[in-house]
Amino acid sequence: MNILTVTLLQSANGAGQAPAGGGGMFWIMMILLFVIMWAFMIRPQRKQQKELEKFRNELKKGDKVVTAGGIYGTVDEIKDRSVLIKVDGEVKLRVDKNSIVRDFSEDAPKA
């Protein structure tokens, strides 16, 4: 007999039997899976979103920022929903506050 035949015979003999784990074990595993997913995925993402929101609310004139599109600039004016950033020379862009993703002043090389 080969392995396929043995497997098929075993599954045919046990087809009418109830599963060994029971219903309670299934719910415990589902709850455990949700807790692990929350601890490693949802919680850190929420923390990161809160930090980004705090950063955007604490923006002030002169901060060096990067937009989501990769534009580097210095904050020149702040309104409720938009920020005017000075890009190069006298070039200024008005961008949505939500498009500012990080501060690059600490990334700049210190001379």
Image (tube, rainbow, N blue to C red):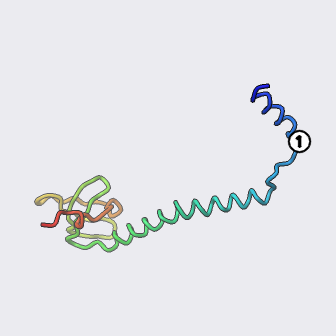
| Residue under the point 68% across and 62% down | 31
Mark 1 crowdedness (10 Å alpha carbons): few <14, some 14-19, many ≥20: few
Q: In the image, is residue 4 above or below residue 76?
A: above
> Which residue is drawn at the image coordinates 57% and 63% (left, top)?
38
Residue 19 in the figure: left or right of residue 30: right
Q: Along the horizontal axis of the image, is 103 left or right of 20? A: left
Rendered image quadrant of residue 52: bottom left
Pinpoint residue 57: horizontal percent, then vertical percent: 34, 72
The residue to which callout 1 is attached is: 16
Asked whether, in this view, residue 71 is left or right of residue 9, the answer is left
| Residue occupying image coordinates x 85% and y 39% | 15
Residue 65, picture quadrant: bottom left
SS at badge 1:
loop
In percent of width and height, residue 85 lies at: 22, 63
| Quarter of the image that includes the C terminus | bottom left
Q: Amino acid at mark 1?
A: Gly
Most extreme residue toward the top is: 1
Which sits in the foreground, 20 or 88?
A: 20
Find residue 98 and report its horizontal and vertical position in percent.
Answer: 36, 62
Q: 74 or 22: nearer the eye?
A: 22
Please identify the quarter of the rendering in which residue 109 is found.
bottom left
The residue at the point 24 percent across, 67 percent down is 106
Instruction: Measuring from the top left, give residue 47's x and y in whole percent.
Output: 45, 68
Number of numbered tags placed on the structure image: 1
Residue 85 against residue 18 in the figure, above or below? below
Locate residue 95 relative to residue 13 in the image: left or right: left
> The N terminus is located in which quarter?
top right
